[in-house]
Image (spheres, coloured by chain):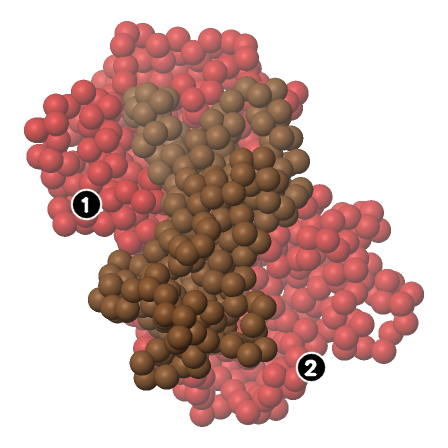
């Protein structure tokens, strides 16, 4: 690994560590109450008292960014994990299913993959209605097709792999060989894709919240804060810019780490 | 003036000196061979000759055709490569552009290095194909690499390396992936190229191949040249113990006749198998006796692996019958031990799985793993490693240990030593011999290497195009081959 890439990876890991700390211990990092309004102290620029300034209701933006981390990142990770599990189950089963079943499942999957993920998520939220839980479900469903496709290909490759055949010759039953050698192998590949996917899930959730389809005021959430600060961007830039930076840094860092993990895995396999 | 002079060449990669003080010179019309086991630094030396070595390259002299190339820039190297020095690499399928026809591939260096017109280039590329004895060159020039056999691909690659009429041709293990009879033809071609005035640098781990093409030989070990001289001297009377052991490892004494072999364990009657209409094995009939080693030889595509897989039971015959006498446990040792282990599992875990499948109770498995590791001469702590962390020889031992976990009485080995260096190969063969005596194993040994089969087998089946063309005791088949194909195979491996 070159020096520049090592620095980039180090920076990305540092950002993720800070994000994790903000998500786990928001009260320690930002003691101010994110919901406490103070009409007289509204729209104050960043200062020593309010590092990121205050919003239209006088709430501390720094505190809101920190307290919003758990929700924004948490829903993103949850959606990714659910998509991974669903993709693994559907893809692996499709990989060993009889040809007609496999063909039907894959054509449906192709149709879903033909639409951009965000559009699928929008449609799902439109059907289910707004709300944090529904947003998580929508983003999960939108991400599933990619995992299904990868899981199916990996399953089909691994089922025929020499080491699986070797286990079968030794007397390991078909189902045991499948659960012990094939499924964990597929899971390994999918989890690398998932580390990259977390970034796009966080972005999708922020996007849906921005459109007002996610958690509702006064809950602190990055996408929602972004949309709240949109109208006063000219006079109070800090309301939208800081949650924007939080989203950008988190997504970029997660993607950088995910891509490097993937490069490492592929280097090892090759 | 020498075509190529190398003085005190050293290559340092990542702080480690992998090539250390290598010096040699090649005259026009001479073929010099660099031999050594994997990791000796021979391929790295070859890449330095083309300005392609990674890391830091230093030499007191490195000159091509009298021109000092040590301080060449990348663009200067590009002018020289393919023009004054050509490269033939090991795997022609990877080296040739899969999306380009053979003719266009060969014409490319002509387009770069000459001012020939398109028509003249086409003319010249056909001449080149003829000069490497490519059958029906016009038709071949219009084909893609995957449509050619391995031997013909290698010929095409040599033709493109010769396109610029280079002074020096570097051939890095050019015949390793090829069958014995094809290998013999490519080696003869390389000798012809040297005889017509090109200086040839031949990199190989195979002393038999070196004997056939080279005038002089350099033996490398751990980055240094430990011995050099004319082929006749070095191969006949090597001065270094290491060279002697390398040469000894390539010669096997044919196995003595063994008496007292048991009853027939397995009888194959007209066994046939085809894959999507193409016959892989046709009407194979043979007998496997208790306690014997049955060798199966043949070139790639001869059906020997398919036959072995049917014996193990992974494939089933379309027609004919494999009749076992009594109950037998059959195990397979795969050709590629790296692929045969789950890459995420430690070797110990894979062994425990094999024991579990064989019905060994959980509390006795750890002890059995240690026994098996000891039986194949592997240090017990290696069981905590993953397959990728083992050397090729260790992996093959681990694969044998796992096959033994099932307590087989018949062991089928598919090219068990083909991927190993000669000295490691010799040790694995000794291990197999010892295991056979100690465990009274019946073995089926599949290989393309006649010498190895002769050394380990009692009886041999010679396969060609899916049929068994000759069979019988090894000593008599090899001493007086009846079928023309057996004769050709033997001639190719002895020459």
Note whether residue B228 is visible. no
Colour assignment, chain B: red
Nearest the eye: A142 or A221: A221
The part of the image, by quadrant, that contains residue B483 is: top right
> Quick one: label 2 or label 1, which is nearer the N terminus?
2
Question: Would you call the spot at circle 2 few (<14 residues within 10 Å), some (14-19), or many (20 or more)?
Answer: few
User: Closer to the observer: label 2 or label 1?
Assistant: 1
Residue beneath disc 2: B79
Q: Give residue B463's position: percent from left, percent from top.
A: 52, 28
Q: Is residue A192 left or right of residue B161?
A: left
Question: Would you call the spot at circle 1 few (<14 residues within 10 Å), some (14-19), or many (20 or more)?
Answer: many
Q: Give residue B284's position: percent from left, percent from top.
A: 51, 17
* Relative height, residue A175 to residue B87 (above, below): above
Residue at 48% across / 84% down in the picture?
A: B6
Q: Is residue B313 left or right of residue B49?
A: left
Q: Chain of mark 2?
A: B
Q: CA distance from mark 2 to mark 1?
A: 51 Å
* Relative height, residue B274 to residue B375 (above, below): above
Which quarter of the figure is the N terminus of chain A placed in? bottom left
Nearest the eye: B480 or B427: B427
Nearest the eye: A84 or B393: A84
Residue beneath disc 1: B383
Colour assignment, chain A: brown
Q: Chain of mark 1?
A: B
The part of the image, by quadrant, that contains residue B487 is: top right
Q: Give residue A108's position: percent from left, percent from top.
A: 62, 30
The numbered disc on residue A95 is: none
Marks 2, 1 in one chain: yes
Residue at 37% across / 22% down in the picture?
A: A174
Q: Give residue A63's position: percent from left, percent from top.
A: 34, 68
């Amino acid at each position: 690994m070159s020096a520049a890439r090592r620095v980039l990876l180090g920076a990305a890991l540092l950002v993720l560590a800070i994000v994790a700390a903000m998500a786990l211990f928001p009260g320690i990092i930002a003691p101010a109450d994110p919901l406490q309004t103070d009409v007289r102290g509204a729209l104050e620029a960043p200062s020593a008292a309010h590092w990121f300034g205050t919003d239209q209701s006088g709430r501390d933006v720094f505190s809101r960014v920190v307290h919003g981390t758990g929700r924004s990142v948490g829903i993103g990770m949850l959606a990714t994990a659910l998509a991974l599990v669903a993709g693994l189950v559907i893809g692996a089963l499709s990989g060993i299913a009889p040809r007609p079943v496999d063909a039907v499942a894959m054509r449906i999957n192709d149709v879903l993959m033909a639409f951009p993920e965000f559009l699928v998520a929008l449609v799902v939220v439109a059907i289910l209605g707004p709300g944090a839980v529904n947003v998580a479900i929508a983003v999960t469903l939108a991400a599933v097709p990619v995992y299904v496709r990868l899981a199916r290909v990996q399953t089909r490759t691994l089922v025929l792999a020499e080491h699986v055949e070797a286990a079968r010759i030794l007397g390991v039953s078909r189902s045991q060989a499948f659960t012990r050698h094939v499924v964990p192998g597929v899971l390994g590949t999918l989890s690398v894709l998932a580390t990259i996917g977390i970034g796009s899930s966080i972005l999708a959730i922020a996007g849906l919240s921005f459109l007002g389809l996610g958690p509702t005021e006064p809950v602190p959430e990055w996408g929602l804060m972004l949309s709240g600060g949109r109208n006063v961007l000219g006079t109070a830039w800090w309301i939208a810019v800081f949650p924007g930076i939080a989203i950008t840094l988190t997504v970029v860092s997660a993607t950088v780490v995910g891509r490097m993990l993937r490069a490492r895995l592929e280097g090892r396999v090759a | 003036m020498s075509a190529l002079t190398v003085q005190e060449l050293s290559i340092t990669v990542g702080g480690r000196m992998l090539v250390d003080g290598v010096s040699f010179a090649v005259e026009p019309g001479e073929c010099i061979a660099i031999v050594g086991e994997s990791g000796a630094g021979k391929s790295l030396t070859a890449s330095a000759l083309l300005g392609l070595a990674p890391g830091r390259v230093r030499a007191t002299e490195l000159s091509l055709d009298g021109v000092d190339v040590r301080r060449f820039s990348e663009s200067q190297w590009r002018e020289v490569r393919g023009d004054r020095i050509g490269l033939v690499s090991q795997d022609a399928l990877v080296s040739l552009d899969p999306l380009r026809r053979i003719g266009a591939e060969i014409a490319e260096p002509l387009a770069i290095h000459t001012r020939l017109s398109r028509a003249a280039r086409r003319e010249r590329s056909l001449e080149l194909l003829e000069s490497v004895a490519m059958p029906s060159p016009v038709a071949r020039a219009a084909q893609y690499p995957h449509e050619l056999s391995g031997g013909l691909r290698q010929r095409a690659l040599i033709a493109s390396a010769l396109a610029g009429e280079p002074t020096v041709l570097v051939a890095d293990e050019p015949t390793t992936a090829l069958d014995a009879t094809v290998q013999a033809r490519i080696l003869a071609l390389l000798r012809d190229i040297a005889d017509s005035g090109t200086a040839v640098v031949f990199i190989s781990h195979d002393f038999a191949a070196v004997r056939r093409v080279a005038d002089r030989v350099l033996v490398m070990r751990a980055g240094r040249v430990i011995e050099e001289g004319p082929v006749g001297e070095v191969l006949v009377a090597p001065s270094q113990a290491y060279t002697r052991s390398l040469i000894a490892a390539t010669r096997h004494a044919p196995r003595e006749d063994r008496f007292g072999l048991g009853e027939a364990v397995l009888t194959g009657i007209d066994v046939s198998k085809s894959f999507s209409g193409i016959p892989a094995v046709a009407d194979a009939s043979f007998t496997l006796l208790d306690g014997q080693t049955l060798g199966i030889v043949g070139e790639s595509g001869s059906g020997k692996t398919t036959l072995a897989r049917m014996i193990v039971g992974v494939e089933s015959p379309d027609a004919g019958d494999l009749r076992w006498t009594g109950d037998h446990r059959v195990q397979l040792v795969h050709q590629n031990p790296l692929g045969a282990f789950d890459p995420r599992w430690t070797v110990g875990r894979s062994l425990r799985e094999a024991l579990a499948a064989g019905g060994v109770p959980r509390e006795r498995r750890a002890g059995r793993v240690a026994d098996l590791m000891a039986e194949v001469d592997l240090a017990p702590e290696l069981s905590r490693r993953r397959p990728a962390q083992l050397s090729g020889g260790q992996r093959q031992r681990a694969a044998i240990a796992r096959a033994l976990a099932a307590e087989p009485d018949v062991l089928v080995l598919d090219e068990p030593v083909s991927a190993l260096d000669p000295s490691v190969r010799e040790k694995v063969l000794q291990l197999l011999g010892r295991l056979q005596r100690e465990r009274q194993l019946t073995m089926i040994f599949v290989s393309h290497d006649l010498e190895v089969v002769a050394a380990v087998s009692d009886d041999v089946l010679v396969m060609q195009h899916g049929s068994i063309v000759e069979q019988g005791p090894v000593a008599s088949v090899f001493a007086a081959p009846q079928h023309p194909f057996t004769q050709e195979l033997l001639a190719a491996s002895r020459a």
